[in-house]
Amino acid sequence: MFDPLSAEFTADPYPIYRGLQASETPQYFEPMGCFLLSRYADVEAVARSPVMVRSAEPFLNEAERREQQVAANFHDMPNHEQFVQFSMLETDGEVHRRLRMIVLREFSKTFVEKHRQMIQSYVDQLLERLLEMREFDFVEDLAAQVPGHIIGNILGVPDADCPKLRSWSE
């Protein structure tokens, strides 16, 4: 049974993940009122389906939309909507497609080849540090470190400041 707050799951989530992946159908998770997609084919099918939506906007009235903005601290950012009008992660339809195409065009194989040495060097540094550790968390100590550093480097952010990008984006 999937219970992300249980001690059993925290101690070793992988048997539960394997059980979810072995299931022929997505599993309904009652506490969140959603289905869990654990297989690549299922995630891909949903992600590509034009009937699926990322944004709750169509289902909210103006008061509910403002309430969500206050909950997300938009009131602390009075010009937020002026500068961040669309997020690819929270839009649908033509806006999502347009933003997605920009991202795909920029993060192409050519882009990766152009930055391969910088990316490899940073990953090598992380791996060197991990080799000195007795235990480590793969996601926290390696995988989660890479995107912010790479994007920061491309944007010209000093290496020492790149970790801030992660906390700011979260």
Image (cartoon, rainbow, N blue to C red):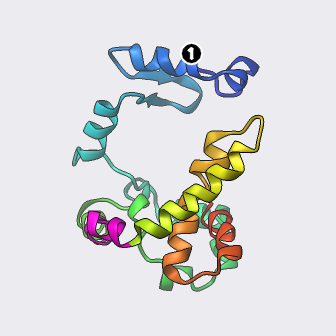
Query: In the rendered view, does 13 fall on the left or right side of 102?
Result: right
Residue 104: in magenta span:
yes
Mark 1 Cα-neighbour bin, 10 Å: few <14, some 14–19, many ≥20: few
Q: Between residues 18 and 56, which one lies in front from this camera angle?
A: 18
Q: Secondary structure at mark 1?
A: helix
| Residue pictured at 31% horizontal, 72% vertical | 106
Query: Disc count in the image?
Result: 1
Magenta segment boundaries in residue numbering: 100-114
On the image, the x and y values in percent for residue 28 come to 46, 22
On the image, the x and y values in percent for residue 16 come to 56, 17
In which quadrant of the rendered view does residue 145 lie? bottom right
On the image, the x and y values in percent for residue 43 come to 34, 36
Assign the magenta stretch its main secondary structure.
helix
| Residue pictured at 70% horizontal, 77% vertical | 76
In which quadrant of the rendered view does residue 64 lie? bottom right
Q: Is residue 59 above or below residue 138?
A: below
